[in-house]
Image: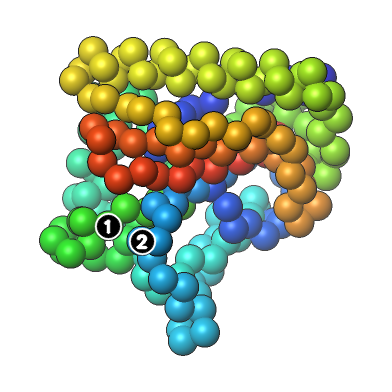
């Protein structure tokens, strides 16, 4: 069974295959608020975002890459509320206008997050190697992931943040552009806000 290190559950998946690099794990995460952004691919060309040596992915003109002052504020909140030190190898796309604190954009919620975790030789399988995971092992991984969420929920609750899991789909293996990924999908709500569909895809 392939080993999967503990996943970061903060707040996945339009990825094209990049150059293969050894000893690098790629975590690709996507958060979508259903119905928040209309598809405009027919009208305007999507922007291609490149992570050198790893992958490229495309974002529609309705989103932008997180940067500047808002990025610094976001990372501080991640550390203070979620107790997470944000990796420098992390690219986040969000509704266009948030970087400029546009009040209209701030009312929308969508995140496309691509994060890379680097390890030593042997930590990760090659990207083109299939993930041979049995149904029993998938159930075990799903249970472990669920336990992580329970711990996260307890941490948030202690900070006065209510996280409710509204639906949960069993873990599965999905192949994208020749790369297998472990996928977790669920719907959640924070402080009774509108529900958010979350898809976490972990390619090792």
In the image, residue 95 sits, relative to residue 47, either above or below, namely above
Secondary structure type for disc 1: loop
Q: Quadrant of the N terminus?
A: top right
The residue at the point 80 percent across, 38 percent down is: 126
Q: Image point 46% across, 20% down: which residue?
A: 149
Residue 187, above or below 178: above
Q: Secondary structure at mark 2?
A: loop
Q: What x and y, as percent, mark residue 40? A: 45, 78
Residue 23: which quarter of the image? top right
Is residue 64 in sight in this rendering? Answer: no
Instruction: Report x, y in % for residue 68.
Output: 24, 53
Extreme-front residue of the structure:
166
Question: What is the C-alpha distance between the residues marked 2 and 1?
Answer: 7 Å
- In the rendered image, the quadrant that contains the C terminus is top right
Q: Are marks 2 and 1 in contact (CB under 8 Å)?
A: yes
Return the mark for residue 40. none
Residue at the spot 63% in from the left edge and 27% down from the top edge: 119
- Mark 1, residues whose alpha carbon is within 10 Å: few (<14), some, or many (≥20)? some
**Quarter occupied by residue 141:** top right
Q: Is residue 203 left or right of residue 193?
A: right
Q: Which residue is mark 1?
A: 108
Question: Which residue corresponds to mark 2?
Answer: 36
Return the x and y of residue 112 as percentages of the image width and height.
46, 52
Instruction: Pick whichever of labels 2 and 1 is earlier in the sequence.
Output: 2
Within 10 angstroms of label 2, few (less than 14), some, or many (20 or more) residues? few
């Amino acid at each position: 069974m392939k080993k999967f290190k503990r996943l970061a559950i903060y707040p996945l998946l339009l990825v094209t295959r990049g150059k293969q690099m050894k000893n690098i794990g790629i975590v690709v995460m996507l958060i979508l608020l259903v119905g928040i952004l209309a598809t405009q691919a027919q009208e305007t060309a999507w922007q291609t975002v490149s992570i050198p040596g790893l992958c490229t992915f495309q974002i529609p003109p309705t989103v932008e890459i997180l940067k500047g002052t808002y990025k610094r504020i976001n990372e501080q909140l991640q550390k203070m509320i979620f107790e997470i030190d944000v990796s420098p190898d992390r690219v986040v796309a969000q509704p266009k206008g948030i970087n400029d604190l546009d009040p209209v954009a701030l009312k929308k919620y969508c995140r496309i997050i691509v994060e890379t975790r680097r390890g030593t030789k042997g930590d990760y399988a090659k990207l083109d190697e299939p993930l041979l995971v049995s149904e029993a092992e998938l159930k075990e991984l799903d249970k472990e992931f669920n336990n992580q969420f329970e711990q996260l929920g307890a941490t948030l609750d202690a900070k006065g943040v209510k996280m409710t899991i509204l639906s949960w789909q069993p873990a599965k293996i999905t192949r994208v552009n020749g790369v297998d990924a472990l996928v977790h999908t669920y719907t959640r709500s924070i402080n009774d806000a509108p529900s958010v569909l979350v898809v976490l895809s972990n390619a090792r």
